[in-house]
Image (cartoon, helix red, strand yellow):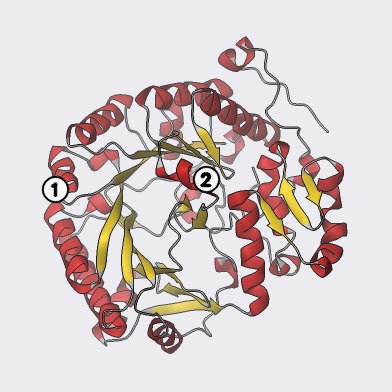
């Protein structure tokens, strides 16, 4: 075990050690975030629109469903961002995309024929507020008209740089229940280094406008491991965020993958924190947020005690999907828009990523499928184990599974990161930063697939 010297005023003031023991050898290999299993790396073009159509046909009348609507446009493109998004600088482009999106919604709804009950609707991107407020209203109204909707929770990601009082009014009038804000950092020099300049006052104003309209469930996305970011920078960002009291804070480690994400080439990699500092940052974030009253959920989410996700944690019903850790337990998640991913019990499907190709497919009345993966029985079993470990911190193996995995898990067991009771394995408190690495031990695809993932912490 290694120790990490932490030189940051607030953290050092309390003379606290790291929240967890540091075993760099266990974190050396990049691993997936496991927002799905199999991961998107395993998707292939052998899955077609016909496969997707059959999966829709298998949805039963009372099946709970969630919808994800992808808006792949932003007014300003941030250099760090790995999302499928482009510049929202042409009205004609946005109009054509929204028309295609409406066509896809109608096509899928017709295929379902009224089956399935929508309980959650999420708008992401990109930046959903890159479109006009009136277009958002029309889009939401179309969803409500086409699908069987049962008092849904509605969440919307926003870019505070394009958010104003009109948007706050529209969100409230549309019964939006949760807003997620990309904050990342409050440090001016770090913002400049990642191409996302947004003064603290801008975030405060957005919070104020949301609260004035009765929207109190607000998520902040924050990041550590950013270029030019020090421990002090992160501590000050966390202090500022805590003072604003968002109901959820997601604290992500920045994934620098310039070969896969060309816009990241604008970031000076020589100014990125090293692995030791990243671990110390994650540890400090955990300590500061939990001491401020937030409950840790999974390996990177923190929620206030009265948040629905905290209650799901108490009930053991936390789930993980492409929005991260969630209380949404719908077995079917329908993704709409370019690059959106649909999840069904036996099939994962991703839409065409290129908005132009996406529009062309829909113009020919074709489901815009680019690739996907069908889940074998082994895949479904592995998915259940990984979800159990990441969401509830525990999984029960069969006797054969436990015997097969004993050797692979021994480095974690020997270090006290795993506790066993028979064939039931439980992550200890110290295992939180190693959760993804432990989950990856069950992933058979990682033994032969090329590494295309981020640091485990």
Quickly name the residue at label 2: 313
Q: Nearer the viewer, mark 2 or mark 1?
A: 2
> Where is residue 182 drawn, in percent x and y?
37, 41
Q: Secondary structure at mark 2?
A: helix
The structure residue drawn at horizontal position 60% and vertical position 69%, both measured from the top left corner, is 38
Q: In this orientation, which residue lies closer to the viewer: 396 or 455?
A: 396
Q: CA distance from mark 2 to mark 1?
A: 30 Å
In which quadrant of the rendered image does the C terminus lie? top right
Q: In this orientation, which residue lies closer to the viewer: 42 or 342?
A: 342
> Where is residue 312 drawn, in percent x and y?
48, 47
The structure residue drawn at horizontal position 41% and vertical position 33%, both measured from the top left corner, is 191
| Relative to 344, residue 323 above or below | above
- Residue 244: quadrant of the picture: top left
Can residue 187 be seen here?
no
- Residue 449: quadrant of the picture: bottom right
Quickly name the residue at label 1: 173
Q: Hey, which residue is sitting farthest top in the picture? A: 13
| Relative to 116, residue 388 above or below | above
Q: Secondary structure at mark 1?
A: helix
């Amino acid at each position: 075990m290694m120790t990490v010297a932490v030189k940051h005023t607030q953290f050092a003031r309390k003379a606290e050690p790291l929240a967890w023991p540091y075993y760099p050898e266990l974190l050396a290999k990049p691993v997936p975030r496991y927002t799905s299993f199999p991961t998107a790396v395993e998707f292939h073009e052998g899955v077609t629109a016909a496969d997707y159509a059959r999966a829709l046909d298998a949805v039963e009348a009372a099946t709970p469903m969630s919808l994800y609507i992808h808006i792949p446009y932003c007014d300003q493109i941030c250099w760090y961002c790995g999302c499928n998004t482009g510049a929202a600088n042409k009205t004609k482009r946005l109009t054509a995309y929204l028309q295609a999106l409406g066509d896809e919604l109608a096509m899928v709804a017709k295929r379902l024929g009224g089956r399935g009950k929508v309980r959650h609707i999420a708008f992401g991107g990109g930046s959903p507020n890159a479109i006009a407020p009136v277009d958002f209203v029309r889009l939401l109204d179309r969803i409500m008209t086409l699908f069987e909707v049962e008092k849904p929770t509605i969440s919307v990601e926003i870019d505070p740089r394009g958010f104003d009082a009109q948007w706050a009014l529209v969100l409230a009038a549309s019964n939006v229940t949760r807003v997620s804000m990309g904050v990342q950092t409050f440090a001016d020099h770090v913002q400049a280094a990642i191409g996302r300049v947004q003064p603290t006052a801008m975030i405060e104003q957005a919070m104020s406008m949301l609260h004035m309209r009765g929207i109190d469930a607000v998520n902040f996305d924050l990041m550590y491991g950013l270029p030019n970011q020090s421990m002090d920078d992160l501590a000050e960002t966390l202090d500022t965020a805590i003072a604003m009291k968002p109901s959820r804070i997601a604290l992500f480690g920045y994934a620098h993958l310039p070969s896969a994400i060309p816009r990241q080439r604008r970031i000076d990699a020589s100014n990125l924190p090293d692995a030791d500092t990243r671990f110390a940052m994650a540890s400090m974030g955990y300590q500061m947020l939990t001491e401020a009253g937030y409950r840790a959920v999974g390996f990177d989410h923190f929620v206030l005690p009265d948040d629905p996700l905290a209650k799901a944690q108490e009930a053991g019903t936390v789930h993980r999907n492409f929005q991260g850790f969630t209380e949404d337990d719908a077995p079917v998640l329908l993704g709409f828009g370019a690059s959106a991913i649909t999840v069904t019990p036996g099939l994962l499907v991703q839409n065409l990523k290129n908005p132009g190709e996406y529009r062309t497919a829909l113009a020919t009345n074709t489901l815009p499928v680019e690739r996907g993966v069908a889940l074998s029985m082994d895949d479904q079993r592995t998915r259940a184990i990984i979800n159990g470990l990441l969401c509830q911190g525990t999984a029960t193996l069969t006797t054969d599974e436990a015997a097969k995995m004993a050797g692979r898990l021994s480095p974690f067991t020997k270090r006290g990161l795993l506790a066993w009771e028979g064939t039931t394995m439980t992550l200890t408190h110290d295992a939180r930063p190693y959760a993804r690495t432990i989950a990856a031990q069950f992933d058979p695809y990682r033994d032969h697939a090329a590494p295309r993932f981020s640091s485990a912490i």
